[in-house]
Image (cartoon, grey):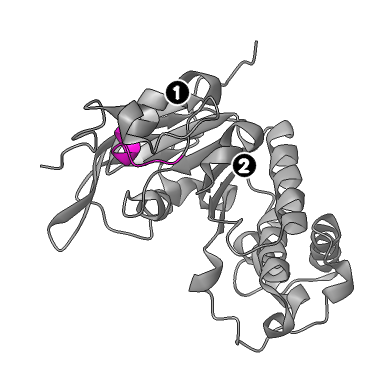
Amino acid sequence: MQRFAVTPAIDVADLTVAYRDEPVLWDVDLRVPEGVLMAIVGPNGAGKTTLIKSILGLLPTAAGRIEVLGAPLAERRRDVAYVPQRGSVDWDFPTSVLDVVLMGTYGRLGWIKRPGAEERARASEALEQVGMADFADRQIAQLSGGQQQRVFLARALVQDARVYLMDEPFQGVDATTERAIVLLLQRLREEGKTVLVVHHDLQTVPEYFDWVLLLNVRRIAAGPVDEVFTDANLRAAYGGRVPFQAGGASLADPARLGTEAEGATPPVP
């Protein structure tokens, strides 16, 4: 039986976030043990990216408490690495692949001390791990979407964090890159790291992840995939419109859903 530390990697209590007085997350509780690989899934507008950014302290919260490794983020910032959505990055910025990865060392060096031989060696090793060592001197604008995603993963790796937060790392990548990313994330988990991933492909959740959070403004369910990734929870999260069944068949057939799916999307006060 897998054992987890008493102190969770991430502890979110009563979290509410609103944009222009419209709740995006409402009263969310979430305890993520150390050493799990968790998918965050839910329909568009469910608050998945908002949750990640709230944990990182990038968004103001209306209410609630967030702790990382038993302390406020300000005390644990060096232990957290973030891979944003690829579309949110200015890829035209004139910098090389190696320089992007070296940015991951700034948190421990500070902004005054410049990366030296040790940091460059770590950055090169991280690029090797994601299959991008041959592109170290390439400008990031010259890379494909999958290659750019691998570079940002290398930047996260070089931080040697304990908690990794990733927003749609599989978006816009080819099958080879997706498989490489999966193997990397699973290796991080094997090393005792905690990884949270905003993910859209429900079909691959049981294969890629061991924990899952189903979110639709409110928390629908969270826990081990084999316990909470169920048809009932999927219907509650997606309002009966999810084209996937945990057992393999489609949930999109209205005859199957009957009245059970009606009003399944949780109400927002």
In front: 217, or 120? 217
Residue type at the position of mark 1: Val
User: Is residue 161 shown above or below 135?
Assistant: above
Report how many numbered discs are placed on residues in the image: 2
Residue at (60, 81) in percent of width and height: 91
Counting from the top left corner in percent of width and height, residue 166 is at 55, 53
Q: Which residue is mark 1?
A: 228
Amino acid on which the number 2 mark rests in the picture: Arg
- In depth, the one of 118 and 131 nearer the eye is 131
Q: Position of residue 117 (x, y in %)?
A: 86, 69
Mark 1: secondary structure: helix
For discs 1 and 2, the disc positioned in front in the rendered view: 1
Magenta: main secondary structure equals: loop
Near-viewer residue (29 or 68): 29
| Quadrant location of the N terminus in the rendered image | top right
> Is residue 176 rendered to the left or right of residue 249?
right
The boundaries of the magenta stretch are 236-243
Mark 1 nearby-residue class (10 Å; few <14, some 14–19, many ≥20): some
Q: Quadrant of residue 66?
A: top left
Residue 240 covered by magenta stretch: yes
What residue occupies the far right of the structure in this picture?
Answer: 134
Please tell me whether residue 189 is drawn above or below residue 20 in the rendered image: above
Query: Disc 2 marks which residue?
Result: 162
Residue 149 magenta-highlighted: no
- Residue 112 drawn at (x, y percent): 62, 75
- Residue 237 visible in the snapshot: yes
Residue plotted at (67% across, 84% down): 141
**Where in the figure is residue 235, as x and y percent of width and height?**
34, 32
Q: Is residue 101 above or below residue 108?
A: below
Please tell me which of labels 1 and 2 falls first in the chain: 2
Q: Residues within 10 Å of mark 2 (few under 14, many from 20)?
A: many
Mark 1 → mark 2, Cα distance in angstroms: 25 Å
